[in-house]
Image (cartoon, rainbow, N blue to C red):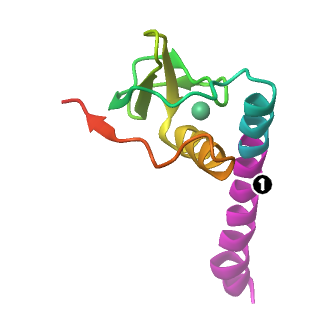
Amino acid sequence: MYRLFYRQVIPVLLRFQRLRENMGVFREIQWKVDSLVLPCASPNHVSIREGDGERCVGCDDLVSAGDLEYRITLPGGRGLSFHGGCFGFWEAEMLRRGWLRQPVTRKHLE
Ligand SMILES: [Zn+2]
């Protein structure tokens, strides 16, 4: 009985917890798109590299080493950093609104 609890119930609870946290970030990013805190323009390009402590504009946490940093460059040259997941939320929201016509091309930096 206890083994069943630990093996099956706890992983499901943890998954729900993560989903709730992710939905919180998704809603925050939607709010930032609504209020134009996040850009509504298509970036010139997106480069992916290892994080070095830049602040993610999606969730406001640091993109630390070990995480991938998605750095977008906007028309005009302004650069913004995202976690991979936060970038995905922003991109999905932009696509949903029709503000992006297609997913942004990613460029991996070595
Ligand atoms: Zn983030």
Q: Residue at x 75, y 90 (%)?
A: 1
Q: What segment carries the magenta color?
A: 1-25
Per the image, is 94 magenta?
A: no
In this view of the protein, which residue sits in the foreground, 101 or 53?
A: 101
- 92 left or right of 78? right
Indicate the quadrant containing the C terminus: top left, top right, bottom left or bottom right.
top left
Q: Residue at x 75, y 64 (%)?
A: 16
In the rendered image, residue 75, in percent from the top left (x then y), is placed at 46, 17
User: Principal SS element in the magenta part?
Assistant: helix
Residue tagged 1: 20
> Outermost residue toward the bottom?
1
| Few, some or many residues within 10 Å of mark 1 (<14, 14–19, 20+) | few
> Outermost residue toward the left?
110
In the rendered image, residue 32, in percent from the top left (x then y), is placed at 75, 29
- Reply above or below: 105 against 72: below
- Reply above or below: 86 against 50: below
Callout 1: helix, strand or loop?
A: helix
Dividing the image into four quarters, tell me where ligand 1 lies: top right
- Reply above or below: 5 against 53: below
In the rendered image, residue 86, in percent from the top left (x then y), is placed at 58, 39
Q: Residue at x 70, y 62 (%)?
A: 14
Q: Residue at x 54, y 45 (%)?
A: 88
Per the image, is 2 magenta?
A: yes
Q: Quadrant of residue 56?
A: top right
Q: Is mark 1 within 8 Å of ligand 1?
A: no
In this view of the protein, which residue sits in the foreground, 30 or 11?
A: 30
In this view of the protein, which residue sits in the foreground, 58 or 90?
A: 90
Give the tally of numbered discs. Answer: 1
In the rendered image, residue 84, in percent from the top left (x then y), is placed at 48, 40
Q: What amino acid type should be assigned to the residue bearing mark 1?
A: Arg
- 20 left or right of 74? right
